[in-house]
Image: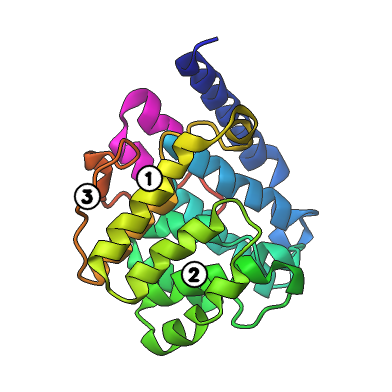
Amino acid sequence: MNKARQLKISLRGLEVLIKRYMNQEVTRPYEACRGFGNLVDDLVDAFHNRALLRFLLNADVDGFFEDLNRSALTYLTLLKGYHQHCDVEKTRANAYTALPLACVLAADNIPLAREIDSLMPRELEVPERRNMFVYTRVLRALATGDEQTLAMVFQEAPAACTGWFRLEEKVAVLDGLVRRDEAAFNQSLLAYLNSFEELDEDEREELSPGADDLDVEALAFVQLARKRGLALTTGHRMLPPELIEPRSRIPRDGYPAWP
């Protein structure tokens, strides 16, 4: 089966999953919805994955940015549910948080990034996920422009951010951003993207459909670089020019909004 057909099948599967979750699984009132956090987190992933496929299959730029915002807005609902004592595991709010933040940054929706940051925990509550917590804290500080927190948290990053798929490569990109070193940023970004070319078949199968052709975190890094006055001087197949210039596409529906 060729890759395009595989991606089309994946997109159809996502559409079915999203429809079922929205119509049957994520029920109101949210406070009474069993497994609310896991269900909503699945939708965060699903909207991100659909964004990739909408662009890769149909060159749907508007749909891509709309689904990135949809993923982030869905995560905002998860965070609000967490604070309202819905059925949300601590890890959903405290550890596995980088993807929705990357989505909102790649879409250059800084007001939404700030709102998400305001609801994310400030202290680590899941010690075994310190690596992801520290990494996300650096992203949050870059997004909000909190230089004091950025300097403090990034000191932990080299030692803390290990043991996760390509996390060290991502931290190298963040290092260039933190230091506002344009050459280092571009060099480390290219090294990060080139690491996708080195994946073996088993590693590729672990990725979301299309994630070996398009990476939202890389697009988020580009927007953060612009925010810090750094120019993108490197090119790569995973940085399509039409996605480097975000479009303001804020969905009004199609995701589990907070009441």
Question: Does 76 sit left or right of 29 as displayed?
Answer: left
Nearer to me, 11 or 251: 11
Q: Report, in whole angstroms, how far the alpha carbon at label 1 lies from the one at label 3.
A: 14 Å
Q: Circle 2: is it few (<14), some (14-19), or many (20+) Cα within 10 Å?
A: many
Q: Amino acid at mark 1?
A: Glu
User: Magenta segment, which residues?
Assistant: 53-66
Which label was assigned to residue 116?
2
- Give the mark nearest the N terminus, 2 or 3: 2
Image coords of residue 137 (percent x, y): 52, 74
Q: Circle 3: is it few (<14), some (14-19), or many (20+) Cα within 10 Å?
A: some
The residue that mark 1 highlights is 66
Q: Nearer the viewer, mark 1 or mark 3?
A: 3
Q: Report, in whole angstroms, how far the alpha carbon at label 1 lies from the one at label 2.
A: 17 Å
Q: Residue at x 54, y 52 (%)?
A: 166
Q: Amino acid at mark 3?
A: Glu
The secondary element bearing badge 1 is classed as helix
Image coords of residue 77 (percent x, y): 57, 61
The secondary element bearing badge 2 is classed as helix
**Can you say whether 235 is above or below 134 in the image?**
above
Q: Residue at x 23, y 40 (%)?
A: 242
Residue 118 visible here: yes
- Give the mark nearest the N terminus, 1 or 3: 1
Nearer to me, 40 or 190: 190
Q: Residue at x 48, y 78 (%)?
A: 154
User: Which quadrant is home to the C terminus?
Assistant: bottom right
**Can you say whether 238 is above or below 153 in the image?**
above
Q: Quadrant of residue 156?
A: bottom right
Q: Amino acid at mark 2?
A: Ile
User: Which quadrant is home to the N terminus?
Assistant: top right
